[in-house]
Image (spheres, helix red, strand yellow):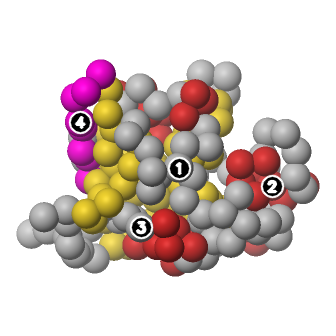
Amino acid sequence: MAYRLDKTEYLLPATELAPALLGKFLCRNIEDEIIRLRITETECYYGEIDTACHAHKGKTPRTETLYRQGGCAYVYVCYGIHSMLNVVSGPEGFPEAVLIRGVQGYAGPGKLTKALHIDRSLNGENFSKSNKLWLEDDGYESSYKTAKRVGIEYAHPFDRDRLWRFILMEEK
């Protein structure tokens, strides 16, 4: 039996929450149809010290959501086309988040948000209270591998080389 993640589970640092979200269900209610897809890939973005993080230059109207307490959605548009879904993590005031890069059946953050009708209207949505978007845990456990994050050529080489991408390993 799956349970909805509690608000306290989002208080982990992004570096811990990103691998912990692998295998959890991303749930979306679209016109009373509940879609549950297992998370297969994540990336973490760790505050103002991480030059790949949107908040690395400080708080702006665009990044305000990142500074909230962990447990809400940070949705932004990439390349003017694709919505990207992030799970804000950690304590209020420290801007960190986990990008959901892939779910079962949809490899790529733009593909999954398109399939699940996730857009900027869900920015700030509270995962522990929302009836539109939430995360569930059914106890699924599996191993994962790490890799460099994707699409952050603008970041400092040190941050580009961090192994902060987490990929669920398939069961054999």
Earlier in the chain: of badge 3 and badge 2, it is 3
Label at residue 34: 4
Image coords of residue 83 (percent x, y): 56, 31
Viewport quadrant of the C terminus: bottom left
Secondary structure of residue under mark 2: helix
Q: Are marks 3 and 2 in contact (CB under 8 Å)?
A: no
CA–CA distance in space, label 1 to label 2: 20 Å
The main secondary structure of the magenta stretch is: strand
CA–CA distance in space, label 2 to label 4: 32 Å
Quick one: 86 or 93, which is closer to the camera?
Answer: 93
Mark 1: amino acid: Asn
Whether residue 5 can be seen here:
yes
Characterize the local packing of mark 1: few (<14), some (14-19) or many (20 or more) Cα atoms within 10 angstroms: many
Characterize the local packing of mark 2: few (<14), some (14-19) or many (20 or more) Cα atoms within 10 angstroms: many
Q: Are marks 4 and 3 in contact (CB under 8 Å)?
A: no
Location of residue 146 (image quadrant): bottom left
Which residue matches tag 1? 126
Characterize the local packing of mark 3: few (<14), some (14-19) or many (20 or more) Cα atoms within 10 angstroms: some
Identity of the residue drawn at 32% across and 26% down: 30
When the figure is inspected, residue 172 is found, relative to residue 108, above or below; the finding is below
Q: In the image, which residues are magenta?
A: 31-39
CA–CA distance in space, label 4 to label 1: 17 Å
Secondary structure of residue under mark 4: strand
Mark 4: amino acid: Ile
Which residue matches tag 2? 55
Name the residue furthest left: 172
Which residue matches tag 3? 6
Earlier in the chain: of badge 3 and badge 1, it is 3
Name the front one of labels 3 and 2.
Answer: 3
Name the front one of labels 2 and 4.
Answer: 4
When the figure is inspected, residue 62 is found, relative to residue 140, above or below; the finding is above
Image coords of residue 11 (percent x, y): 57, 73
